[in-house]
Image (tube, helix red, strand yellow):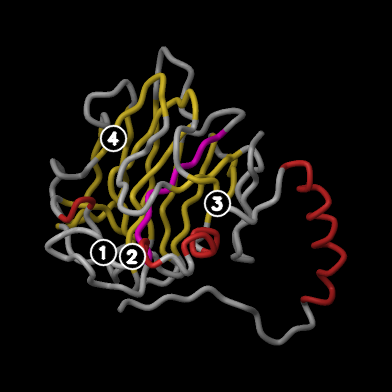
Amino acid sequence: MATAVLGAGAAHASLSPDFTVKVEAPGVVNSTANFDYFGVETFDSQNTGISTFTSTFNGSPITGNYQNVNVIPANQYGGAGGSGDYAVAGISQTHSYSIDFSQTGQNGINYFGFWLSALDGGNTVEFFNGATSLGTFDPANVLSFVSGNNAYYGNPFAPFQGQNSGQPYVFVNFFLNSGTFDKIVFNQTNYSAGYESDNHTVGWFKDTGGGTVIPGVPEPSTWAMMILGFGLVGGVMRTRKTATKVAFSRA
């Protein structure tokens, strides 16, 4: 059964209830899911700086067209394994970048995962099927899972090990249980902060493997009731003068 994930940002539509979102154990930088076919973009062979390029995800049957992505060398904020390069939106360079996928002769694409490092408020990723948005995932759900687990906090890899200890580092898996998607947009709403990611993994999954479903999110059967409940309390919420926000700062 799919696990629905509710994003906390009021400006963003939550992910479709057809998604299951799982996180890997601390320090794991690749998916433990099983696939019919998949590929991984590590960015290590790409030119650094802001660019547009086409990736085959290390020779997979999938093609991804990256638009306006900023690739930078590993530092305390990103770079799986502590070396190579990684992708980032924000850091006063770009607000967002997109990936358009194509995959002919097979079933399509229903999985995406990545090493999410130095999690900031304003980190969002949105999924599309054509012009239709399948919703947005924001950092609040990840934060709720890793909060209190020190193993997820701080860069886990030499030569940056222990640095930036106030922010979590985790591999996140997105499984679409019904249908496919063909575009993803990474966005950093706070232009000066960063949305760091690496080991972009894309494919058609057979099973979700290891990892843990992010807890505290509703099952699809409760989705309609929650929407109704939000509608009933909406008038009350609009009377509040302040709203709770998820905010992070670099350590």
Q: Which residue is mark 2?
A: 118
Local crowd at mark 4 within 10 Å, few (<14), some, or many (≥20)?
Answer: many
CA separation in Å, label 3 and label 1:
21 Å
Q: Which mark is residue 40?
A: 4
Q: Secondary structure at mark 1?
A: loop
Pair 3/2: label in front: 3
Seen in the picture, residue 88 relative to 150 is either above or below; the reply is: above
> In the rendered structure, which disc, 1 or 4, sits on the residue that comes first in sequence?
4
Q: Which residue is mark 1?
A: 155
Q: Percent from the top left, x then y, of residue 22? A: 50, 45
Q: Quadrant of residue 230?
A: bottom right
Seen in the picture, residue 112 relative to 227 is either above or below; the reply is: above
Pair 1/4: label in front: 1
Q: Secondary structure at mark 2?
A: loop
CA separation in Å, label 1 and label 4:
21 Å
Local crowd at mark 2 within 10 Å, few (<14), some, or many (≥20)?
Answer: many
Whether 31 is among the magenta residues is no
> In the rendered structure, which disc, 4 or 2, sits on the residue that comes first in sequence?
4
> In the rendered structure, which disc, 3 or 1, sits on the residue that comes first in sequence?
1
CA separation in Å, label 1 and label 2:
8 Å
> In the rendered structure, which disc, 4 or 3, sits on the residue that comes first in sequence?
4
Q: Which residue is mark 3?
A: 214
